[in-house]
Image (cartoon, rainbow, N blue to C red):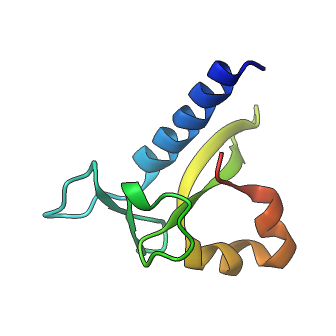
Amino acid sequence: MSILSTLFASKHRKLAAWQNARLVNGSDPKVIRQDDTGAMIRWNDYADRNSNWGWLIERRQSGARGRDEFRAVHCQNVAKRAGLFGGLLRFSTR
């Protein structure tokens, strides 16, 4: 895979995860959203594990065909959802 196609795929996954996150009333949907648990996340804090608004991408397989679905998950919820080793396998910063 070329560098350009890798960058495009990364951007696509990030945008897909963001679009699957919940909207927050009164907030700009391009900047602030919530993950599935209601934790607040901010677009610019992607992959920032030290931020109170940081988030990562969770990849899930959905449907009978096993299509990938991407979800935004607050960094603090990563360990809760996946466990110590699962977080290394299911969550991505690329």
Q: Nearer the viewer, residue 45 or 77?
A: 45
Q: Nearer the viewer, residue 38 or 31?
A: 31
* Residue depicted at 56% across the width and 60% down the height: 47
Work out whether 27 lies above or below 92: below
Residue 4 image offset from top left, x and y in percent = 63, 20
Q: Return the residue found at the far front.
A: 3
The image quadrant where one finds the N terminus is top right
* Residue depicted at 38% across the width and 55% down the height: 43
**Quarter occupied by residue 69:** top right
The image quadrant where one finds the C terminus is top right
Residue 50 image offset from top left, x and y in percent = 53, 77
Left/right placement of residue 45 relative to residue 78 reads left
Q: Return the residue found at the far right.
A: 85
Tally the marks.
Answer: 0
Residue 15 image offset from top left, x and y in percent = 46, 40
* Residue depicted at 53% across the width and 66% down the height: 48
Q: Nearer the viewer, residue 17 or 45?
A: 45
Residue 57 image offset from top left, x and y in percent = 60, 54
Work out whether 17 lies above or below 35: above
**Quarter occupied by residue 77:** bottom right
